[in-house]
Amino acid sequence: MMNKDWFMDYAEHAIRVIDIVTRWYELRGWITKNGRHILIGDDEGGGSSGGAGGKAAKKIDNSEKSDIIKLKDIEVGKSVGAKAKNYDILDPATGEYFNFAEGTKIQNSEVFAGKGCKKPLDRVVAEGLAKQIGGKAENWQHAKGHGIIDYYGEERPAEVHWFQEKSVGKHKFKIKRWED
């Protein structure tokens, strides 16, 4: 008699491989859109036209630094593959990690320190991020936004902070404060 569990084992293995490959691209600053891998911040067409495309952030005007750089909302998917793309968010009060609720967006996102802003990112922090994660220290940014956190099956709104660098993506998410 043939073991029917082999198919489930194979399917679980395939899902793990897809999750690993997706995570590999994400860690290197890429996203998967319609089956294609796109560098975060590039147009969907890969060209340099000024279209809306798949921009992760508005263009930075380096001629005059601003206080805050507004970002587009960041969508958190609902599929099994999207779970691999969800971010681990530290709650410093408890030391526990949570994720964004599936199908939500990180809204009102903005960069408030680092590249392109008047307020610089602390040199020690930027150099530590570059050494630990990658990218160039001068390109790191500190950003914040508002999202819905999956808190033990309940949805709770929170202000979330993170660091980002174009070539390595977003890292070190932290709950700054719960908003309920």
Image: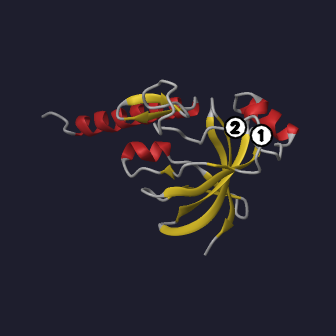
Residue that badge 1 annotates:
64
Residue that badge 2 annotates:
61
Asked whether 137 or 78 is in front, the reply is 137
Farthest residue, direction left: 1
Cα distance, mark 2 to mark 1? 6 Å
Which residue: 53% across, 63% down? 148
Residue 9 falls in which quadrant of the image? Answer: top left
Q: How many marks?
A: 2
- Quadrant occupied by the C terminus: bottom right
Could you tell me residue 89's position as x and y percent? 62, 53
Residue 80, compared with residue 51, is above or below; it is: below
Q: Secondary structure at mark 2?
A: loop
Residue 176, compared with residue 139, is above or below; it is: below
Could you tell me residue 122's position as x and y percent? 85, 42
Farthest residue, direction bottom: 180
Label 2 neighbour load within 10 Å: few <14, some 14-19, many 20+: few
Which residue: 63% across, 33% down? 166
Tell whether 115 sits left or right of 107.
right
Instruction: For residue 47, say whether it is visible.
Output: yes
- Quadrant occupied by the N terminus: top left
Residue 135, compared with residue 177, is above or below; it is: above
Q: Given the image, on which type of amino acid does mark 1 rest?
A: Glu
Label 1 neighbour load within 10 Å: few <14, some 14-19, many 20+: few
Could you tell me residue 179's position as x and y percent? 63, 71
Asked whether 65 or 174 is in front, the reply is 65
Asked whether 66 or 44 is in front, the reply is 66
Label 2 with label 1: CB-CB less than 8 Å = yes
Q: Given the image, on which type of amino acid does mark 2 rest?
A: Asp
Which residue: 47% across, 51% down? 76
